[in-house]
């Protein structure tokens, strides 16, 4: 099995890892209740998606 002849530099290693950072999820506001939610997902606070009720949510006291 071939082995590397020379050691890779730190800058070469770090260039390869430049795209490995985690990104914060993008949030959009629910048009019904104005709560932040993930795009293309049902709102967990009110149960609406695309202007209609998709999920029944129990009301908190």
Image: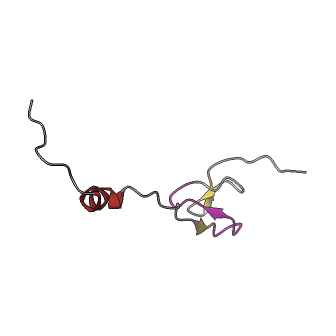
Q: Magenta stretch: residue 61 in it?
A: no
Q: Is residue 50 above or below residue 54?
A: below
Q: Is residue 18 above or below residue 54?
A: below
In terms of image quadrants, where is residue 16? bottom left
Q: Is residue 4 above or below residue 38?
A: above
32 and 2: which is toward the camera? 2
- Secondary structure character of the magenta stretch overall: loop
Rendering coords of residue 11 (x, y %): 28, 62
36 and 57: which is toward the camera? 36
11 and 44: which is toward the camera? 11
58 and 22: which is toward the camera? 22
Rendering coords of residue 56 (x, y %): 71, 47
Q: Quadrant of the N terminus?
A: top left
Please report the residue visible at 46 percent of the width from the left and 57 percent of the height from the top.
22
Q: Is residue 59 left or right of residue 23?
A: right
Please report the residue visible at 42 percent of the width from the left and 58 percent of the height from the top.
21
Q: Is residue 29 left or right of residue 61?
A: left
Q: Is residue 23 left or right of residue 7?
A: right
Rendering coords of residue 43 (x, y %): 64, 56
- Looking at this rendering, what residue extends furthest in the top direction? 1
Q: How is the image coloured?
A: secondary structure
In terms of image quadrants, where is residue 27? bottom right
- Looking at this rendering, what residue extends furthest in the right direction? 61
Please report the residue visible at 85 percent of the width from the left and 50 percent of the height from the top.
60
Residues drawn in magenta: 30-41
Q: Magenta stretch: residue 37 in it?
A: yes
Q: Is residue 61 above or below residue 32?
A: above
């Amino acid at each position: 099995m071939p082995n590397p002849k020379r050691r890779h530099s730190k800058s070469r290693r770090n260039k390869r890892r430049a795209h490995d950072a985690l990104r914060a999820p993008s949030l959009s506001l629910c048009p019904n209740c104005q709560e932040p939610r993930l795009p293309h997902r049902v709102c967990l606070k009110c149960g609406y998606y695309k202007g209609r009720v998709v999920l029944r949510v129990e009301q908190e006291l």
